[in-house]
């Protein structure tokens, strides 16, 4: 166990086992490789990532719109969603790394996505 100790620096648990602790935070935390729980219980699932032609977005709130940017920050594509599930067709993109930004009410979420050949 890394860095876990009591105020007198003795280990909290010393039985040789590894333990995982969840600490509350305002930052996003990963639920699985493609599922993310964000502030205010905003959750989004992105699959697949990496992808070939399209990605599916699923959220627990209605997504207003999505934006795709290249790695220089140039806006490549913007789509209106108005749904909690959305298929984003990215067939026209060249293989490479892009930034997906999804807006859901007052929340927004940014994630790196990778297009394969």
Image (cartoon, grey):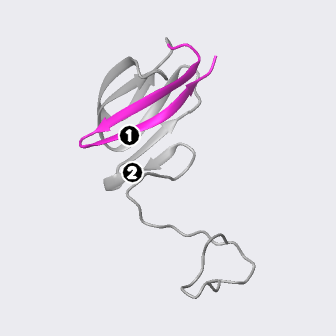
Q: What stretch is highlighted in magenta?
A: 93-117
Q: Is residue 13 magenta?
A: no
CA distance for labels 1 and 2:
8 Å
Residue in the picture at 58% in, 21% down: 52
Residue in the picture at 46% in, 48% down: 36
Q: In which quarter of the image is residue 16?
A: bottom right
Q: Give the side of residue 76 with respect to residue 96, left or right.
A: left
Q: Name the residue under label 2.
A: 38
Category of crowding for the residue at label 1, using alpha-carbon neighbours closer than 10 angstroms: few (below 14), some (14–19), many (at least 20): some
Query: Which quadrant is the N terminus positioned in?
Result: bottom right
In contact (CB < 8 Å): disc 1 and disc 2? yes
SS state under label 2: loop
Majority secondary structure of magenta residues: strand
Above or below, 32 relative to 25: above
Q: Give the side of residue 55 with respect to residue 85, left or right.
A: right
Circle number at residue 109: 1
Q: Position of residue 21 (x, y in %)?
A: 55, 70
Above or below, 65 relative to 44: above
Q: Where is residue 38 in the image (x, y as percent from the top left)?
A: 39, 51
Q: Is residue 115 magenta?
A: yes
């Amino acid at each position: 166990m890394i860095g876990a100790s009591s105020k007198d620096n003795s280990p909290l648990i010393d039985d040789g086992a590894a333990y995982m602790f969840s600490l509350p935070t305002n930052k996003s935390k990963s639920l699985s490789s493609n599922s993310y729980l964000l502030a205010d219980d905003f959750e989004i699932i992105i699959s697949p990532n990496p992808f070939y032609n399209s990605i599916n977005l699923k959220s627990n709130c209605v997504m207003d719109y999505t934006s795709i940017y290249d790695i220089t920050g140039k806006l490549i594509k913007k789509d209106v969603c108005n749904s909690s599930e959305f298929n984003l067709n990215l067939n026209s993109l060249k293989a490479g790394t892009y930034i997906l930004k999804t807006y859901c009410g007052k929340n927004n979420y940014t994630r790196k996505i990778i297009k394969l050949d």
